[in-house]
Image (spheres, coloured by chain):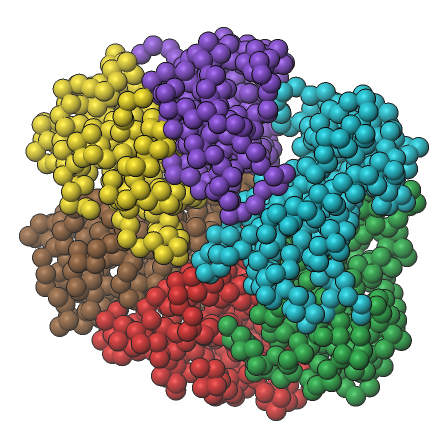
Chain colours: A cyan, B purple, C yellow, D brown, E red, F green
Amino acid sequence: MKDSVHISELAFTRYNELVKDGETVVMLPVGALEQHGPHMSMNPDVLIPTAISERVAKKAGALVAPAITYGYKSQQQSGGGNHLPGTTSLDGMTVTATIRDVIKEFARHGARKIVLMNGHFENSMFIVEGIDLALRELRWDGIKNIRVSIISYWDFVLEDTIEKIYPDGFTGWDIEHGGVLETSIMLALYPQFVDMSKVVDHDPAEFPPYDSFPVNPELTPPSGTLSSAKKATAEKGNLLIEVCVNGITKALDDMF
Amino acid sequence: MKDSVHISELAFTRYNELVKDGETVVMLPVGALEQHGPHMSMNPDVLIPTAISERVAKKAGALVAPAITYGYKSQQQSGGGNHLPGTTSLDGMTVTATIRDVIKEFARHGARKIVLMNGHFENSMFIVEGIDLALRELRWDGIKNIRVSIISYWDFVLEDTIEKIYPDGFTGWDIEHGGVLETSIMLALYPQFVDMSKVVDHDPAEFPPYDSFPVNPELTPPSGTLSSAKKATAEKGNLLIEVCVNGITKALDDMF
Amino acid sequence: MKDSVHISELAFTRYNELVKDGETVVMLPVGALEQHGPHMSMNPDVLIPTAISERVAKKAGALVAPAITYGYKSQQQSGGGNHLPGTTSLDGMTVTATIRDVIKEFARHGARKIVLMNGHFENSMFIVEGIDLALRELRWDGIKNIRVSIISYWDFVLEDTIEKIYPDGFTGWDIEHGGVLETSIMLALYPQFVDMSKVVDHDPAEFPPYDSFPVNPELTPPSGTLSSAKKATAEKGNLLIEVCVNGITKALDDMF
Amino acid sequence: MKDSVHISELAFTRYNELVKDGETVVMLPVGALEQHGPHMSMNPDVLIPTAISERVAKKAGALVAPAITYGYKSQQQSGGGNHLPGTTSLDGMTVTATIRDVIKEFARHGARKIVLMNGHFENSMFIVEGIDLALRELRWDGIKNIRVSIISYWDFVLEDTIEKIYPDGFTGWDIEHGGVLETSIMLALYPQFVDMSKVVDHDPAEFPPYDSFPVNPELTPPSGTLSSAKKATAEKGNLLIEVCVNGITKALDDMF
Amino acid sequence: MKDSVHISELAFTRYNELVKDGETVVMLPVGALEQHGPHMSMNPDVLIPTAISERVAKKAGALVAPAITYGYKSQQQSGGGNHLPGTTSLDGMTVTATIRDVIKEFARHGARKIVLMNGHFENSMFIVEGIDLALRELRWDGIKNIRVSIISYWDFVLEDTIEKIYPDGFTGWDIEHGGVLETSIMLALYPQFVDMSKVVDHDPAEFPPYDSFPVNPELTPPSGTLSSAKKATAEKGNLLIEVCVNGITKALDDMF
Amino acid sequence: MKDSVHISELAFTRYNELVKDGETVVMLPVGALEQHGPHMSMNPDVLIPTAISERVAKKAGALVAPAITYGYKSQQQSGGGNHLPGTTSLDGMTVTATIRDVIKEFARHGARKIVLMNGHFENSMFIVEGIDLALRELRWDGIKNIRVSIISYWDFVLEDTIEKIYPDGFTGWDIEHGGVLETSIMLALYPQFVDMSKVVDHDPAEFPPYDSFPVNPELTPPSGTLSSAKKATAEKGNLLIEVCVNGITKALDDMF
């Protein structure tokens, strides 16, 4: 049995050696099962943060926990909306409770440096609440020397990279859903899950400055993507991964 | 007893006439009790969305429900953090349950057009979840012809207004906490709750591209504000209110 | 910015000075949005406990927190029933969670003397449960030197006052809903929210010695009030306020 | 196997015949395990409503379900307080969920007339909430022709009986805890659970017009009772039972 | 008032003497209201664990708490299924919350040795979760020297007894529902609740190696029993009780 | 993009075609992150049900959803106990809520035939509750033509296979944790995650006929396994997989 950065691939005895003194960082990818357009599989929100975590872990001597595979409800202005087929979401309290429980368990094992690597925009606040509830209960157990961070990997894409990736101008991460960012990274990592011939080349989705429920399905482009992935390339994907991995690896140093 | 746009100021018989056929829009301000710096009271997140709702309601023939007075936990990068004194927050599920329950009640009264007017950045996703849970239960009750919108009033400040308000450049709504936007509006509406002599004139707060918990208090400026309110004026406040009220009034037309 | 007994009107820095050592009493009005007959607005359960808290706070050097604006479901024998339009209520667990969360936050700020000032009969037990859950969690945080009281202001109306207010005999607080007590106090405090010409002068509501659900709407007088407000006067209101304010101010001394 | 009014003593086939068409009333005693003074066992809140339900059921052709054996937290002014040994209580939400679940099950069996017979003062509002939640969910299942009542048996003790039981004056049901009412009924029903030689003959407990938490134990008489049971007799108990049984039997007729 | 092993039959003062130092074992029967065939009442899951607890308590100097009278949903392969009339079940979280709350209360009284005596197969995991949640909260209260065990009484029927009871072969506890085990014990304890003339003598129920929902009612024998009770006798019942009582009494010694 | 039995690897448009008419079976593996001895990785409870689902899906034309990667708390007598490092578990309600939410989403997509493929013994009852809650809510949405099954794959290992796998006698699935069954299957599927040289060859674990909490760690063998994996072989693993896959494929036919 080879050593691995993936906790799930270790015997518990080896994991115990690594984690018990609290020095090793544990990274937990939090994803979703969500439509990402007709040209891409529904797993980018799991695969991308897992891949980035893996690369960071190798550089930083960290560990990667199994990804949370379902996430919070897709919102129309950031993921097309939760009315679409394929998108498979949890209630907010379910996401929060999962995060809370898993953090507490890692802390029981000895971990004191935990990073939640988010791959699904809509998860953020429910993860934050899960962290808060976990820290509250850990405090009641006398565990106060713990630090838990939440990272959305796209926040590590720096200005100059954005200019390279989007030479015609960048319209914001929210409407990047199924667009150049995610598609490029998937092309770099898992080309078998992308079919560029099926990309629908549409203008960026436009939304009013508010959200209405039930959503008006007509506001979401029929493709389910919010901007066109046409200019996605594996090369851009590799650049994005590199920037994120380097940035996050460095952030881990600052963080703990 | 005079007529009023405030539901709480109406006799139930009058309210019933207005709401029973579902045509009248009901606006619900959702706020927070949160520190906004040493120069301002802790009520802007309640008073501002209430005031805007009131003005919109008068123009649009809508009604305003009593504000939700406590909100979700302040986040460091948007409100200074929930470790600060004065900031008084609810668990996520509590916010969600409150929103869910109140929407269902307005629907029972007959309302079919409901607008949640958010005044506290951190509330957004827990309001969204509350709307989703309410619509789910209403659907089980056979009520499907209802529409609920969520508005964060600052999303109606248009580009050209931003240029007027921030002639030296705009750094984003998130670090506006206790800054020019909120202080200007409060100066316009409730000058008695602002003391410009106590504004701490500091550089915009800078944060790493991730959040850590428990928060490192040193990352929040000692003032609790995330940018300086020094250039706030009542004039800017009036402009901001006008833009928001006009934009939202128009949006109500599009929405329903 | 003037000093104020209202927490929401203070800068957090001033609030912090007042509350951090635990000596200052924090009063939290807990109300409801509830029909109170065709002659009165729907806000008495919020406005009355807030006004009484304010007056007590001024005399006792206490602070008043923003009122909880929605309460537990109106019961037929004490509020006409939750089937009536206008009445806008929360599930029991929502009330309890709100109380729990807010108390814990005041305790985090340093408050050790907290008074919940209830204005809505049906809230009582859900407030009690909220207090119990808050104290339990605070205990887990090592905070044991805290005292939380719940007051229903009408319990401070003494026998001799009752005789003055109800010279023809008193039939109990429960059927006082929208009757002489509340209407008189509102006449004293907010005459603009009362229209005595719309009072329905009916006999006290009579109910069987049990409650049935769903309620039989015919048992509630069509006015929504459970006794006639005809004999309400501002003078009686002022007397009632005086008795309550004095009694509660004195009680605060005994309590802490 | 003899026929029985107790559901638990019937084979399900017999129960099914009785309940499936919805005509038979199902009575559910809701009690508590609570201290009732040094002279009495801790089961009166279960035994008394069960015995009354049984007698009513025999007269009215109703059925009695197994009692809920644990109840909501004892309050100081009505049960001595939940700090006392022996008193064994549930969180409010636990009581509510139990009531909700059980009502829904009886409705599934066909029952449409359900009476909750409360034996523990503090249970009332949590039972009410349980009923409301059950009816809400049953409504979603299309079951709307159901009626659920809640009875606190002492509310059927009429004025003239009170005069006979308390010739020296009646001080209210709330401080009757472990006093003449309950002790007399237990003497009539289960004399083996009463030891009159251990009654502590004290003045009625006196409390301030508010509740404080954590409770000040000194406000509860050391006996745990709130008034003296010294004048309790089996004869009074029989009278009380008769009045309650007759009143409730008649009420069942009016109710359904 | 005689001494008793039943907590409910003791005055709180006597209970306090017995339990305050933590030495006395508290046994809590956890049952259900569930159909057990046309030949038997619906209370075996409450009466049997209560009776066994009582006998063990007398031998071991333990105490017996009032039984939890409703349990988790009957499963088709172990109880016939929750679609049958009479079976009256709780949601899993309701069972868990009840167990959690009651254990915490016994611990507050001083008990440190608690045994949950389960009489209903389907309760097991929800009891386990209730124990875990109670121990977690007690730990936060600094109570760590407590031990809570869960016993399903049938696990104490030894191999040689099984051979005596089932001379033709034993098919497993799961399909024993309403069969020889429970019927024999009820014949020994409460013959008035068994009518052997109504036993349906059918082959053991056969199920596929999975569960489907909603259940296919045809898989459950029309009798509701999963195996025939025809060979049940009071003699076998007495033997079973003896084996269980002796085994559990001895286990209590090992346990604490 | 190739077609796949894994939902996550499909574009949503392709998934929609397959699932919208309700004919295609959706299989959901439910696992855990749990220690399985020093000779094996911690992922068998996820990998095995996923692999079996995949093989069944290919034969039966079904789909496989992303596995639930964390499960209910390990119990000492079936998984060594939840005190061990590495084992990372959820509260019961978290498991239940996840299952509930995900089933409802598949039903929204059109799925009417759903199989939960359990890989972790302790999950079973919390999955059952999740199914029940999902079906309840779907019923409220008018969806009644749905069937959800739960399979624990080891229940498909037939008697004659057991004899081949355990020629020296079979001691029950519960103490198989980390033993011959799981290790053989992992050797067949993922030999890289097994190191037979690290197998601890111990006697089967012996437990008393009850569970105590907190667990006595000494009852669990130091290896964390409950029986020896020494006789595990890839050949046995292949046989087990074949038997399970064939049995479950056939069961799918019977089920729907």
Q: Indicate the quadrant where residue A158 lies.
A: top right
Q: Is residue D17 visible?
A: no
Residue C146 pos. (x, y %)? 29, 50
Q: Residue at x 28, y 22 (%)?
A: C2
Q: Indicate the quadrant where residue B64 lies.
A: top left
**Looking at the image, is E73 positioned above or below residue F82?**
above
Residue D139 pos. (x, y %)? 53, 39
Q: Is residue A164 visible?
A: yes
**Looking at the image, is D188 positioned above or below residue E115?**
above
Query: Which residue sits furthest front?
Result: B202
**Looking at the image, is E249 positioned above or below residue D116?**
below
Q: Is residue F54 left or right of residue D136?
A: right
Residue C191 pos. (x, y %)? 24, 15
Q: Is residue C19 left or right of residue A87?
A: left
Q: Residue at x 26, y 63 (%)?
A: D84
Front-lying residue, D222 or A16: A16
**Looking at the image, is F148 positioned above or below residue C88?**
below
Q: Is residue A115 left or right of residue B4?
A: right
